[in-house]
Image (tube, rainbow, N blue to C red):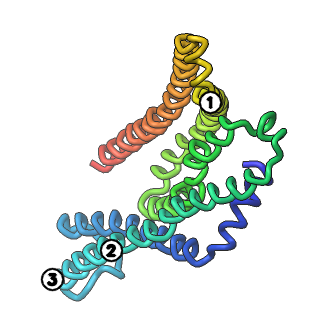
Amino acid sequence: MNSNTFKYWWSYLRANPLPYLLGLISVIVCNICQVYFARALGHTIDFFSSNPIPTWATYSNKSSTFTFLFLSILIARFILMLGRMGWRITLARQTHASGAMMKRDIWSNARYFSSDDLVDKYPKGVLMNAANSDVNQARFIFGFTLVGLIDIIFLALFSIISMLQINITLTLSSLILFCFSPYFIKKLSTIETLKYEKAQESLSSFNDLTSQAVATVKLQKLGQTSRFWFLKLFSSAQTYRDKRLQANLTSLKYIPYMGASSIVAYIVLFSLGIYGIVQLI
């Protein structure tokens, strides 16, 4: 994100502070409930296994302790549901509202372009691409991308704190494995950006070629050149399809990259956990 893009994004956030503030609170509440739900389930298992549980969850008798654990889990799930509704109503809605705003801005600027600019710098294909494909991709940074970013920061923070309270060795072992992930994700994102830009350039050329073909329909009939234009449009469409598929396949590589990190982390945790249990026996 360059400086101009960041200023544009930041100006929109400053113009709509309330939805983003409420959305931030909703996502953080969801993260807290998710972490507490997992810990409360662990305390419940310890309760039925007669293992010690924290003093704040312990009452005078087992019935009161179980009631507290059960109600806290139930309330956490209910608050989690409300939190998800909250960020969907606030942050997720901004994804669609920002898309409409960007299209209005494109029109408000494009209608004052000179004829030379519309021919040389901003032909029909470029404007069509910007108003549709580019806007559909860019609008996510105003909503769903922020949800993921807040999740990464706060859910990771709360999870690490909770994990450290359980076992420091296992927590540090799992975190060391994830330290390698950013390097591969950065390389993959760079490749994805380059392929996406090439696909967008191809789409702009295809849109521009389509507008030319539509504008010259009468000449095509007179000159019997419809076959030529058909082959030209078909070739341009195939070029865009291939480049777009390459960009989409690159995006799909995030799934095995992240999945492999999680699987390796689980293997290490299970191995260390089993070793620790064997040592206790």
Instruction: Tell me the amino acid under the disc marked 2.
Output: Ala
Check residue 76 in the rendering and tell me which mark sits there, or answer none. 2
* Label 3 with label 1: CB-CB less than 8 Å: no
- Up-down relation of residue 128 to residue 172 (above or below): above
In this rendering, which labeled residue sits more in front, label 3 or label 1?
Answer: 1
Residue 244 visible in image = yes
Q: Where is residue 219 in the image (x, y as percent from the top left)?
A: 62, 20
Q: Distance between the residues labelled 1 and 2?
A: 61 Å
Marks 2/3: CA–CA distance: 20 Å
Q: Residue furthest front?
A: 222
Task: Using a 10 Å C-alpha cutoff, classify the residue at mark 1 as few (fewer than 14 neighbours), some (14 to 19) or many (20 or more).
Answer: few
Front tag of 1 and 2? 1
Name the foreground residue: 78 vs 20.
Answer: 20
Residue shown at the point (19%, 78%) measured from the top left: 66
Q: Name the residue under label 1.
A: 215
Q: What amino acid is labelled 1 in the image?
A: Ala
Q: Upstream in the sequence, badge 3 or badge 1?
A: 3
Residue 64 percent across, percent down from the top left? 19, 85
Q: In this view, does 31 lie above or below 60?
A: above
From the image, state whether disc 2 or disc 3 is nearer to you.
2
Question: Which residue is under mark 3?
Answer: 63
**Name of the residue lying farthest toward the left:** 63
Identify which residue is drawn at 62% across, 73% down: 16
Q: 157 or 95, which lies in front?
A: 95
In the picture, measured across the screen, residue 189 lies left or right of residue 7, that is left
Mark 2 surroundings within 10 Å by alpha-carbon count, few (fewer than 14), some (14 through 19), many (20 or more):
many
Using the rendered image of the protein, determine whether residue 199 is visible from the camera's viewpoint: no
**Badge 3 element:** helix
Q: Is the Cβ of the residue at disc 1 closer than 8 Å to that at disc 2?
A: no
